[in-house]
Amino acid sequence: MKHPLAVALAVALIATVPSLAHNAQAQAKTDKTVKFTADTAKPSANPFFQPSPLPLQFPQFDKIKDSDFAPAFDRGMADQLKEVAAIADNPEPATFDNTILAMERSGQILNRSVSTFFNLVGTDTNANREKLQQQYAPKLAAHRDAISLNPKLFARIKDLYEKRASLGLDAEGVRLIERYHSDFVRAGANLSEAQKTRVKAINGELAELGANFSKNVLKEVQDSAIVVDTKEELAGLSDERIAAAAEAAKGRKLEGKYLLTLLNTTGQPPETDLTNRALREKLHKASVIRGSRGNEWDNTAIVSKVVALRAERAKIMGYPNYAAYVLEDETAKSPEAVNKMLGQLAPAAVANAKREAADLQAMIDKEQAAKGEKSFQLEPWDWAFYAEKVRKEKFAFDEAELKPYFEMKNVLENGVFYAAGQLYGLKFKQRTDLPLYRDDVTAYDVFDSNGKQLAIFIADMYARDSKRGGAWMNSYVEQSELFGTLPVVANHLNIPKPPAGKPTLMTWDEVTTMFHEFGHALHGMFSNVKYPYFSGTSVPRDFVEFPSQVNEMWADWPSVLANYAKHYQNGQPMPKELLDKVLAASKFNQGFTTTEYLGAAMLDQNYHQIGDLSKVPAAKDVVAFETASLKKDGIYYPPVPPRYRTTYFSHIMGGYAAGYYAYIWSEVLDANTVEWIKQHGGLTRENGDRFRATLLSRGGSKDALQLFRDFSGHEPQIQPLLERRGLTAPAAKPAKAK
């Protein structure tokens, strides 16, 4: 097992993995505990009861049934509790082997089943999986507590922690003891029995609330899709997007109509192209009101309760607020550090956004005057539409001009894979013999520069109703010397699937997202650690996005771009003048982009820096709290709402609670690293091997910021980030690394 509290991560992720909600009336009629007990599947037939016999323990997707999960969860939890009891009750003195390594080896059935289940819930859920998710969320939370709050077990870990320097262990072994001790303390091992009882109750309730929030988010996305009666109303959209809207309508038995489905962000892609302003407004308003409509999927009460419970738990743990509790274990270390960094960025971001807004307003005024019509004030639903017009005027290109050069498989194989080959010496070969959970998912063997297999990579690129929004990487099998395992990792995007027979053409944003997610995949595939606890992306949340953001730099690297940016019909390379325009426009609209991100990141901190429970907003006050917080932080600017509003902000209801700042914190490290690589020759094996050896292969086996220093030779500075985003700040020389 990755480590004994791995289940905690799975439970935390529940709220960030929306599930497919079914008809509300049907739900009401079946509002009972779902009975998936061990008698529904023969033990010998359950694919989770033993490691998969497929290459690298690749999951047996063709044999896994929904009815397998509950028996595997039940047996997995029971087996692990027996294993933990044997460790805790061992009459022999605690040793690294009989306590720490024994914990590392525990819970393998549970780990296999939980990781596969939550990965599938994220990428291809259904009603059965939704029910299981809700049923097992509190059970898994209770299981985690039963381990982390076991006093005998903690006593053994504490004993080893206190004498860790004299055990003759290497640095990774010492760090493993330290991390176990920290995890148990942060879970409440030092609390009184009464406090432990309350924490257990809070954890169970939070798990259940998280599952309900997740369900509501997806249901609201589905219910808020906009039905359009005529093709004429969709003027401005490409033929492919109109065809996709028609297909989506057919899928809901709305023959002859069109359906604009929503992403879980505030802004919606069609807003860029729709000429029908009324439809843009309708789409935007449907997006921002999700989760606060007073219907059965309203999330305001859940938000209020979750914030209160987290604040209470933090107080019990001895912290002033939940953010202080979370950030202590991140590279940021404190809310003050996060507030300082976000506060440095906010004024410049809003100022830039207002300058951009002036350009957009001028474009509106000019167009309206040319038509002899009265002008109107720029609104949020106008921003993307007129930003694209200004972009075209300033840089003389249309985003649509790029798409023919970005056919999906070509971008993946001749762009993303090619860059990895040049930088790290990797080779890829598609496999067609492995079972997959969908027919539009692909798998590749990954070979190291010495010809040996390094990993298996799963590419799941298409959007579907059963898939959560956004893009992410996950692991099915993680590398560790202890178990002798190699990684099986997956990337997930949400690229609209074209009608049958049509090519999948990507936007530039989707291209950079593909490179980004593959950076996470490399972090998982290059892992070279002894213990499962430290494998792959097992690093602080405000560090985990850093390597993936670095990998984005290769998307427009000249030699890489030349290898994949080719017209899907005739193979002609993208004209240099078009690429030059794209690169020249790279800082365009960064005021908007930074402001909408900071709005969400600062909102997250405002909720989780509440220490006084009386200050937690009631359900009816959640929307008002959001507005007041944005105004207080100087990030309130109505034309640019937060990237996520509270009631559909899945990150902060799950694994990124008090941690949404992590993306820009990581980008500081990323910008420093990109600058270093450029100064040292760019796309070379020497640079790739250095990045891999000093950072990507180390997982969580060393302090995260020290890994950055090991690679770059200096402390992180904010200046490269400000320059990248077109913001301004006084230059500073890099401080020497300690």
Image (spheres, helix red, strand yellow):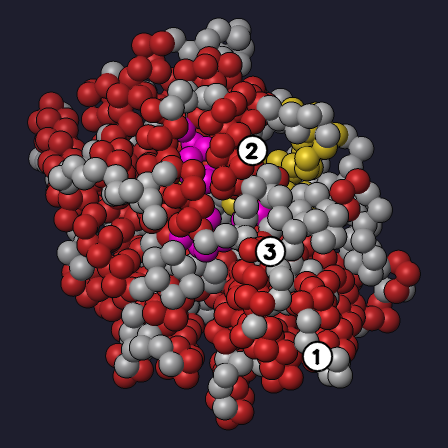
Could you tell whether 124 is left or right of 400 in the image? Answer: right
Task: Write down the residue under mark 2.
Answer: 497
Gap between marks 1 and 2, in whole Å? Answer: 59 Å
Gap between marks 1 and 3, in whole Å? Answer: 21 Å
Q: Position of residue 473 (x, y in %)?
A: 55, 45
Which residue: 83% across, 57% down? 50
Circle 3 — which element?
loop
Task: Write down the residue under mark 3.
Answer: 170
Could you say which quadrant of the image residue 31 lies in? bottom right
Q: Quadrant of the N terminus?
A: bottom right
Could you classify mark 3 by the number of other residues whose Cα lies within 10 Å: few (under 14), some (14-19), or many (20 or more)? few
Establish if 146 lies above or below 719: below
**Range covered by the magenta-colored residues:** 536-553
Which kind of residue does numbered mark 3 sit on?
Answer: Asp
Could you tell whether 291 is left or right of 697 in the image? Answer: left
Which residue: 22% across, 64% down? 629
Task: Write down the residue under mark 1.
Answer: 93
Most common secondary structure along the magenta stretch = helix
Q: Tags 1 and 2 in contact by the CB under 8 Å rule?
A: no
Which residue: 60% across, 56% down? 170
Front label number (1 vs 2): 1
Q: Position of residue 44 (x, y in %)?
A: 91, 61
Could you say which quadrant of the image residue 608 lies in? bottom left
